[in-house]
Image (tube, rainbow, N blue to C red):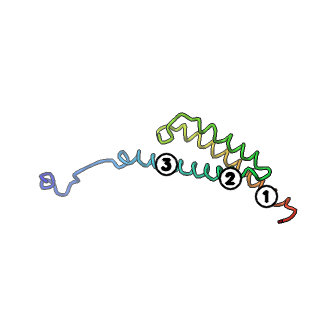
């Protein structure tokens, strides 16, 4: 109260918002990346449950070969200072993109070779 009376026009606190909120922003970005990655995993794991579809076995095996190394990582995924996750995520996304293209090809080929709808 006495500080406010001495200089009513000056700021009571002078701080750098980047210094205070910068780490929070990085943490939120990491969380967003994790949400995207786990959303992708859930989509493909749901697809992997359909082993009864002829020809899906190879795609499902490819999916598990992509995620198994990720499961063995020993670092903390929430540690935004560890950029090894970012490098691993880049590789993961590249492999998932390739798998997605293979899946699209599988679906297209499956529709082209349908002989009847019964």
Report the quarter where the C terminus lies: bottom right
Q: Judge from the rendering whether residue 12 lies leftward or rightward of residue 51; answer left or right.
A: left
Between label 2 and label 1, give the one nearer the viewer.
2
Place of residue 100 in the rendered image (x, y in percent of width and height, measured from the top left): 70, 51
**Disc nearer the start of the sequence (3/1):** 3
Residue for point 77% across, 57% down = 107
Crowd band around label 1 with a 10 angstrom C-alpha radius: few (<14), some (14–19), many (20+): few
Q: Position of residue 50 (x, y in %)?
A: 71, 52
Taking 112 as reference, is 90 above or below it?
A: above
Give the secondary structure at mark 1: helix
Q: Nearer the viewer, residue 67 or 24?
A: 67
What's the distance in space between the residues labelled 2 and 1, CA to CA? 16 Å
Farthest residue in the bottom direction? 117
Q: Is residue 70 left or right of residue 8?
A: right
Label 2 secondary element: helix
Instruction: Say the numbered circle drawn on residue 47.
Output: 2
Q: Which residue in the rendered view is the most extreme toward the right? A: 115
Q: Quadrant of the N terminus?
A: bottom left
Residue with the mark numbered 1? 108
List x then y, in percent, for residue 67: 63, 42
Give the residue at mark 3. Answer: 31
Helix, strand or loop for disc 3: helix
Depth-wise, is mark 2 or mark 3 nearer the camera? 2
Which is nearer the N-term, disc 2 or disc 1? 2
Seen from the viewer's position, the closer of residues 33 and 110 is: 110
């Amino acid at each position: 109260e006495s500080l406010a009376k001495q200089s009513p026009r000056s700021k009571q606190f002078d701080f750098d918002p980047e210094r205070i909120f910068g780490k929070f922003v990085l943490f939120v970005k990491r969380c967003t990346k994790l949400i995207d990655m786990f959303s992708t995993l859930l989509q493909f794991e749901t697809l992997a449950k359909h082993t009864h579809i002829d020809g899906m076995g190879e795609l499902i095996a490819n999916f598990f070969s992509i995620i198994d190394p990720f499961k063995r990582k020993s670092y903390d995924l929430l540690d935004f200072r560890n950029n090894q996750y970012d490098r691993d995520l880049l590789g993961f996304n590249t492999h998932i993109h390739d798998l997605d293209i293979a899946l699209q090809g599988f679906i297209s080929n499956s529709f082209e070779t349908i002989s009847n709808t019964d």
